[in-house]
Amino acid sequence: MRPHATVLHRAPGSIVNPTRQKLTRDSLGLAFTQYLVRAMSMARSFVAAKVLGPGSFGAWNALQLMMDYGSLAPLGTQQGLDQLVPAALVEGDPERIRRLKRAALFNVVTMTLVFSALGLAWASVGSSRMRANWQLTGLGLAFACVMFVNVANVGTSILRSYGDIGGLTRWFVIQGLIGSGLGLLLMVWFGRWGLLWGWAAGCFVAFVFVLVRGRKVIPLTPSPALDCLDLLQVGLPLYVFTAGGLVMRNLDRIVVLRYLGTQALGYYGLSVNVLTLLMAVPDSLAYVSYPRLVKRFSESSQDPAAIREHVDRLVRGVAVALPLAAGLCALWARDSVHMLLPRYDECVSPLRILAFGATGLSLSTFASIVLMTVGRRIILVPAAVFLSALSAGLQLLSLRWNGGLAGIAAAASSAYLLSGAVLLSLAAAGLGFTFRRGLGLISRCVAPTGIAALLTWGCGRLLLRTPAPLTLGRFALLVGASLALSAAYFVLVLPFARGIGFRALAMESELPILSSLARGVWRDRPPGPK
């Protein structure tokens, strides 16, 4: 018998209530996996951008965008499965569990087929950039990837319900490493088609792995039942919020593709990849923090005061640290792009602007997990709809004013920051903050981004005004500008950072690399506030 089989057949109590050590280990393992897969995806994007050029790279970004939206096809089935199967396991109702699993598979397969059919029909009518770039063969292969991923998501949801988070971790690794690595290899001979074939291979192998891993608990035959509607009804609120977040993060790329064309999407897509890189640590930190917040909240008889101070320090810590990274990224952007990707000079302006939107996205993420922890997740639904509509309005205004790629990036970053402020205010209310303290928290989280943006602009204007080749002198100038930016930022933001306790936060996170670095740097110093 394989080792993982013992995980799937423990007593129900240990399955649904894993130990703290196991929960921590699995969460950290998944966070590290996300680092690895994201790094591989970043490498694929930058190499593909250099090899393919803006036009073909834009076509690949457009196809990725379509596959991303394919994850929304099941309409909340997975979110419902995440909630109903663990509950049925606790109740000890095997018949209900069996029906839920098969109903979820029916929903996902049926709705993904409908999504794929509608997508192919849309591409077949009239003039379509997607069909011109990929033909129906490429689109069909992309929809096959969507099916593999959506069905695998049902499998990983079931595995998680049985306590097997390792299956999800390995699925991420297999899909990411094979999809990205093989795609880069095939790109040498087949161009952008090599990226698609590599990604399809990664999705298929990962899909087969999940079915084999969970062969004793994952059904292979779908079955329609009334449970199909139960899954949709229970999962709909969280689905609407998830869909709203996806739309907000991707709406700017849709606008660029629709109104400015595929080549413009190639430029803009590179900027989005840099934003994704900046979000790596905040996203992983949020993922690891969520179960711990839930645990503290439950152990305190659901008293918001038990997590209030920790959330305050966590959110402010990210809001203080991230803008400096965005400023340094913006400072080096022009020279780095000109040296490494000279055909992408047009991405520099949107890249610099989008970098400062990372704070808004991070605040939205942390505020969302707080609202889910304190039982106010239902408020996320109208918030997601409103904020998505706001983002769409800002994007359209930028087009009306002929702002180009920089205007769209400015609209997206503004929407991210507004979203972060709105959701953070709702989270502050859920934690029982007074109006004055909640307003102070929002201002202390948003102000550092404005300070970093102004300092970056000033350093660029004073020290790096004239573009020049990256010689030793230019490199020294960039380093000097970076030190000046960091020193000025530290002085100006110091009042906002009081009481955070960065050492304690980094060590409490237990994230790979981050917590080890904190222990090494501050080994002999007393810990910060807890």
Image (tube, grey):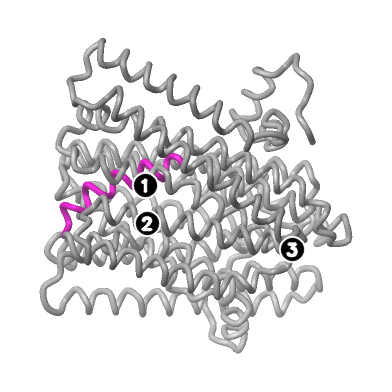
Which region is colored magenta?
261-278
- Circle 3/circle 2 CB separation < 8 Å: no
Which residue is identified by label 3? 374
Residue at 80% over, 56% down: 17
Residue at 58% over, 86% down: 229
Magenta stretch: residue 262 in it? yes
Q: Earlier in the sequence, mark 3 or mark 1?
A: 1
Q: Quadrant of residue 189?
A: top left
Q: Earlier in the sequence, mark 1 or mark 2?
A: 1
Magenta stretch: residue 269 in it? yes
- Work out whether residue 439 or residue 130 is closer to the camera in this orientation and state it: 439
Query: What secondary structure is marked by label 2?
Result: helix
Query: Mark number for residue 513?
Result: none
The crowding category of the residue bearing disc 3, from other C-alpha atoms within 10 Å (few below 14, some 14 to 19, many at least 20), is: some
Which residue is identified by label 2? 412
Q: Position of residue 300 (x, y in %)?
A: 88, 56
Whether 297 is drawn above or below 118: the answer is: above
- Work out whether residue 337 or residue 148 is closer to the camera in this orientation and state it: 337
The crowding category of the residue bearing disc 1, from other C-alpha atoms within 10 Å (few below 14, some 14 to 19, many at least 20), is: many
- Work out whether residue 348 or residue 287 is closer to the camera in this orientation and state it: 348
Quadrant occupied by the C terminus: top right
Q: Quadrant of residue 460?
A: top left
Query: What secondary structure is marked by label 1?
Result: helix
Q: Earlier in the sequence, mark 3 or mark 2?
A: 3
Which residue is identified by label 1? 354
- Circle 1/circle 2 CB separation < 8 Å: yes
